[in-house]
Image (cartoon, helix red, strand yellow):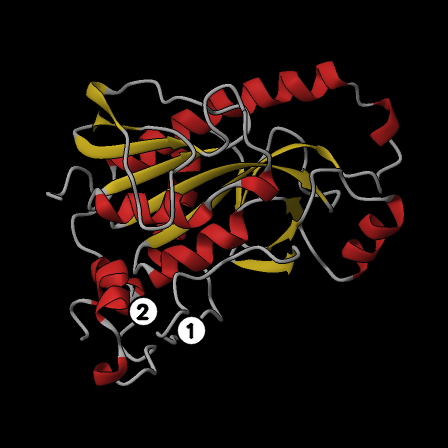
Amino acid sequence: MQSRASIGIIGGSGLYSMAGFETHEEIRLETPFGDPSDAFIVGTLEGKKVAFLARHGRGHRIQPSDLNFRANIYGMKMLGVERILSVSAVGSLKEEHKPLEFVIPDQFFDRTRGRISTFFGNGIVAHITFADPVCPQLSQLMETACKVAHVTGKRGGTYLCMEGPAFSTRAESNVYRQWGMDVIGMTNLQEAKLAREAEICYVTLAMVTDYDCWHEAHDAVTVDVVLANLMKNAENAQKVVREAVKSMPAERTCSCGRALQHAILTNKDAITEPAKNKLGLLIEKYI
């Protein structure tokens, strides 16, 4: 498929569309891993070719554990996307990360169970480097975009990815705080791993909706308050994303685009034709 977009945007809870799109169209894709969450909205934003995907589907139909992360990221790759800006609602595990503020984490911690977070297997073995899971170029860009948009965005910290769909117990929340975690969510770790395998730059803009249940004021937070924060966060996130897209440099200076260069362990001669056909989009330049 001819490249349709260079920048991908994944919208999380509260962000199901992107204001400011010009000449946009809906594209439904079939991937080797099934159907993505929804149609990709492809168009022009701030003069750049962009593809937007509602992570949970428009209308918020898909819970975190049921998301087809592989199809979502592979679909981005099919469209020609080289960079993904992922927006996600999170709870805060530290007093310093206040509701309505944003965090740009540089680490992830996995507390999910049994989710598929690799494109490989079935005859092809690859081990990506994942010590630093976030693209440094995008992280810097997102921090600057927050400043330009006059939104508090703190760069650095750890996003703990939990299974869900229920939120944490108070005991779990307090343990995560003892571990030094910063924010907690249910989606972004798998996206980050798959984006790295697909050699796509990835960054998370974590929107704090409220403090997790460890906080003494947690029980006073109503659904109405959380929904209001989601709406305000979505509004601010669109401002930040537009600024990030607007200032996106043409060239990538990171190593994300070479993530598979030394990661594939399987001998080229041992890779079957069906496997090559399924993963050709990812591995063709190395085999």
Q: In the rendered image, which residue does mark 2 sit on?
A: 259
Where residue 176 sits: x, y (%)?
A: 77, 55
User: What type is the residue that disc 2 sits on?
Assistant: Ala
**Mark linked to residue 278:** none
User: What type is the residue that disc 1 sits on?
Assistant: Thr
Q: In this rendering, does residue 252 appear at all?
A: yes
**Are dots 2 and 1 in contact, CB under 8 Å?**
yes
* SS at mark 1 in the image: loop
Quarter of the image where the N terminus is located = top left
Left-right relation of 118 to 89? left
Mark 2 nearby-residue class (10 Å; few <14, some 14–19, many ≥20): many
Q: Residue, x 33% and y 31% (percent of image)? A: 52
* SS at mark 2 in the image: loop
* Quadrant of res 197: bottom left
Q: Residue, x 48% and y 25% (percent of image)? A: 15
Of 208 and 98, the residue lying toward us: 208
* Label 2, label 1: how far apart the Cα atoms are: 7 Å
* Quadrant of res 3: top left
Where residue 35 sits: x, y (%)?
A: 38, 38
Left-right relation of 25 to 32? left
Of 1 and 132, the residue lying toward us: 1
Q: Point out the tag, 2 or 1, that comes first from the N-terminus.
A: 1
Left-right relation of 9 to 82? right
Q: Is residue 50 above or below residue 107?
A: above
Q: In the rendered image, which residue does mark 1 sit on?
A: 129
